[in-house]
Amino acid sequence: MAPESLLAAVDLGSNSFRLEIGRVGSHQRIERVEYLKETVRQGNGLNSRHELSLDAMQRGWECLARFGERLRGFAPAHVRAVATQTLREACNADDFVRRGSELLGFPIAIIPGEEEARLIYRGVSSSLPPSQNRRLVIDIGGRSTEIIIGQQSQTLQLASFALGSVSWSNRFFADGALSKSNFAQAVAAAKQALDQSRFAYPGTAWDCAYASSGTANAVGDALTAQGMDGKVITLRKLRHLYDQLLEIGHVDKLRIPGLKEDRRPVVAGGISVMLAVVELLDINELEVAQGALRQGVLHDLLDHEPPADKELAEIQALQQDFGIDTGHAERVERIAMQLWQAIEPANTPQAGTQALHIATQLHEVGMRVALSNYHRHGAYITEHCGLATWEPALRQRITQLVLGHQGKLRKLEDAIEEPELALPLMALRIAVQLCHTRREPDIAGLQLRRSGMECRLSTPQGWMLAYPQSARLLEEEAMAWSKTPWSLKLQLR
């Protein structure tokens, strides 16, 4: 698809309708342009005969009309609108879809639960770093819960169950009481509905677990607001929120820090289902994932398989976006890697080499912002760039290397004692100094050795006379390291 093309995904969920617009960027990435969300609560409009009320349909139509105004002028092939469990259940869904499609300006498709699960996994995997791990993904929506196992961008196993935060809140907390008996019934019923998943998704079938979408984000936000790590959900943390709900006692009094107003009426049902899933599948940790159904729809529209080397594609895309001199970056990487190999600890994990590789390729990423203090701009970009799917620990190390590759070292004084940071940083800084002419440096006969916390750099006879500016830069570099627990000794000849 041509760069700069706009794509749009419309997700008609049971609790909220969402519109996400993305731009096709360099290397076929999708960059968010706009995100609109309206709490429609269409799932509340289903009666016992599975008829969608006129009020619920009207709320949905009004939202779709607003979305339709935003989508005017979009090519039909660039927009996909999908409806999920509420409209799968509604016997008068055709009436809603017919009018809704007219107002939106694009056809609305009611997708099966298995297709919803596939799209959810594709959206989640697009936000995660490359990995061979088998990933378990739990998505608790308004009226359905999807459980998926996948590897990289492909699903291996998927299922959709007809229970969610809206339906469980309506069924077990209709009186608004946040009581032990209501919760006990809700969790027991959820376990019964999900019972077959105990055998279909054993712990031996997956390596790591993620939670996506509304309930997961609501739980994560509430935990974060209370000073806990909201990026990872555990049974203990869920029970902490459960105890808070019991103490509050009623939905009308529900005021939990971090919990958004539109989530209050359905949070009890969502937590009940999540408790059931975590206990049933014996999940120790659920990492909150950022991808969701709508991102999966956008990637389907792009119809582009992820590159074989996702990390390389992300680096190249950032280099292109920020106008990086790739020839110089490769030169710095080659020299830095040679120096790093000479002083690296024998037990250095692969992640150290990976961080240095990425940092050398992106060390000048901040120059597009401003030449002055560009290393600080670069560190901000690598720390916050959402288009790179690095693991948090790897992202932190890349950011430290980009920040520290020039200037004084005291900005990293809290971390620089560790050889896992100090040694690759020294290799990077020396490489940058040797490549200051932006030409291939003469490093024949140059040697870097390490003994404890001292590194010694020596050059062949005549090198200092041939390269006086390089020698001066190395002397300044040795002075910078003398103010840290490490030392760089020079034998320049």
Image (cartoon, rainbow, N blue to C red):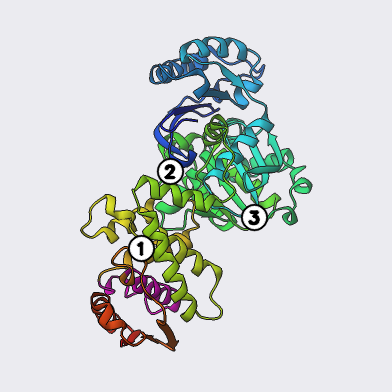
Measured Cα–Cα span from mark 1 to mark 2: 36 Å
Tell me which amino acid carries mark 3: Gln
Image x and y of residue 102, in percent: 50, 10
The answer to which of marks 3 and 1 sits earlier in the sequence is 3
Q: For residue 361, which quarter of the picture?
A: bottom left
Which residue bears the numbered disc 3? Answer: 132
Q: Does 350 appear above or below 50?
A: below
Which residue bears the numbered disc 1? Answer: 402
Residue at (20, 58) in percent of width and height: 372
Q: For residue 98, which quarter of the picture?
A: top right
Q: Quadrant of the C terminus?
A: bottom left
- Visible residue check, residue 356: yes
Image x and y of residue 371, in percent: 22, 56
Question: Residue 97 vs residue 378: left or right?
Answer: right
Tell me which amino acid carries mark 2: Leu
Label 2: which secondary element: loop
